[in-house]
Image (tube, helix red, strand yellow):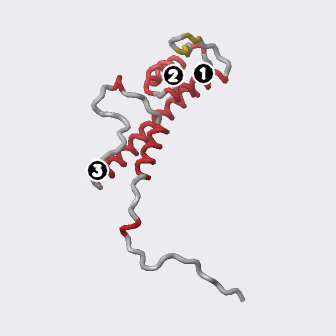
Amino acid sequence: MATLSKIDLCKKIKDDISNLTQNELEEIFKIIYKTNNNYSKNNNGVFVNLSWLEIDIIQQINNYIDFCIKSHSEINKYENICNSFNKDINKPIEDVIINDNTDIKNKQKISSYMKFYLLKKKFMKQTFNLNSYKIEKPLTYEEYLLN
């Protein structure tokens, strides 16, 4: 894989940053803040001139953004698998994470961790009823003789 120049990395970061959630954007700011780089802040948000940053900081930010985008795609794959399993067993979908009828601009960004938590919680609810099974012998403690 060819290494990108500083300008190309800055353009890539500028294009990819719109796909991140608020928590992921805060993590990028933490990277910039920990390295004592300059930024400006006002009521519209925090602004950073990427061309003023060192190349290793830009690469660190780019690597983090790549990680986030890959994790989003993995979560989407997992959601699709869970949805297909859910449809196969004819269970109604109880929790809708993202409404497919809304525009992309109107979607609320949900972190990948929250999506995973909601899916896990949803499938943990599907328990079986113990009363429907006939128990022939209740479980008891066994007594062992020690010689």
Q: Who comes first in sequence, dot 2 or dot 1?
A: 2
Q: Residue at x 47, y 23 (%)?
A: 17
**Quarter of the image containing the C terminus?**
bottom right
Q: In the image, what residue type sits under mark 3? A: Lys
Left or right: 31 in relation to 62: right
Q: Secondary structure at mark 2?
A: helix
For residue 86, above or below residue 40:
below
Question: Considering only vertical position in the picture, is 131 above or below 54?
Answer: below
Q: Disc number at residue 55?
A: 1
Residue nearest the observer in this picture, 124 or 85: 124
Q: Mark 2 or mark 3, which is nearer the start of the sequence?
A: 2
Disc 2 residue type (three-letter): Leu
SS assignment at label 1:
helix
- Picture coordinates of residue 128, whole percent (x, y): 39, 61
Instruction: Tell me the distance, in whole angstroms, between the alpha carbons under discs 2 and 1.
Output: 9 Å
> Circles 2 and 1: CB distance less than 8 Å?
yes
Residue at 60% of width from left, 21% of height from top? 55
Q: Secondary structure at mark 3?
A: helix
Comparing labels 3 and 1, the label whose residue is closer to the camera: 3
Q: Nearer the viewer, mark 3 or mark 2?
A: 3
Residue 19 coordinates in the image, percent (x, y): 43, 27
Q: Which residue is mark 2?
A: 9
Task: Name the residue rendered at 47%, 22% in the picture.
Answer: 12
Task: Establish if 87 lies above or below 133.
Answer: above
Q: Separation of disc 3 and disc 1 at Cα?
A: 48 Å
